[in-house]
Amino acid sequence: MRILLLEDDIDIAEGLVAGLKKHGMACDWFRSARLGQSALFNAPYDAVILDLGLPEIDGMDVLAYWRQHQIPIPVFILTARDALPDRLAGLNNGADDYLCKPFSLDEVIARLHALVRRSQGRSQPMLQYGGLQLDVAACSATLNGQALSLTQREWLLLTLLVSHPHQVLSRAQIEDKLYGWDQEVESNAVEVHIHHLRKKIGPSFIRTRRGLGYQLGTPP
């Protein structure tokens, strides 16, 4: 899961970024409303966390701009504006959720998972493929009842593949989901992660589609 964060408070943003990464999410943080507004058009984000009190452009105007351009990605407003008219305006203008500061990180994580589940047409926090079961909320995976030990990138790749069981994903698409803009990607990084997942789950679990990318293979 890759999250776009627009927040000008450094302490809040750094805490959110650290918390999101701890829960198996990649995150791109922007303090600039203009940069953050355009970022949504340039990367495959799963959800947005949006502060309203941003410099340059008010967060409500950023939200309106996205919705005017038919951007369907879930937007979660996280703001100090706690008055009822502000909450109603945010939801009526296209926000998918609204939470006032101060907040609990656990609640933010739970709400993000719920938003992404709904956007993907899922009602349950569990993903399953054969004997493989993923608890997205807990960032844990089991294979035939046995816990799997995964790195953060392996977890991100695994959830991406299992969320799109019939889709062929190119290396570029996978890199966009696994890495933020501030992270360097080695040329063989995706192949290394796939090699490790095959060792842990099964050699035929991930199928290579030559010249196209990768997709799920035989259920474990």
Image (cartoon, rainbow, N blue to C red):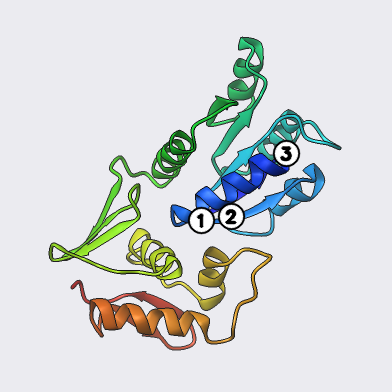
Give the position of the C terminus as an image quadrant: bottom left
Q: Position of residue 188 (x, y in %)?
A: 53, 87
Residue type for callout 1: Lys
Which residue is at a point 83% across and 36% down the rendered structure image?
55
Viewer-proximal residue among 91 and 211: 91
> Counting residues from the N terminus, which is met first, the one under dot 1 or under dot 3?
3
Q: Nearer the viewer, mark 3 or mark 2?
A: 3
The quadrant holding residue 76 is top right
Residue at which label 1 appears: 21
- The reply to whether dot 1 and dot 2 touch (C-beta < 8 Å) is yes
Q: Position of residue 202 (x, y in %)?
A: 23, 81
**52 left or right of 189 in image:** right
Q: Secondary structure at mark 1?
A: helix
- The reply to whether dot 3 and dot 2 touch (C-beta < 8 Å) is no
Residue at which label 3 appears: 9
Rounded to the nearest whole Å, what is the CA distance between mark 1 and mark 2? 7 Å
Residue at which label 2 appears: 27
Residue type for callout 2: Cys
> Counting residues from the N terminus, which is met first, the one under dot 3 or under dot 2?
3
Residue 160's place in the image compared with 36, above or below, is below
How would you rate the neighbour count of disc 1 (Cα within 10 Å): few for under 14, some for 14-19, many for 20 or more? some
Q: Secondary structure at mark 3?
A: loop
Residue type for callout 3: Asp
Q: Nearer the viewer, mark 1 or mark 2?
A: 1
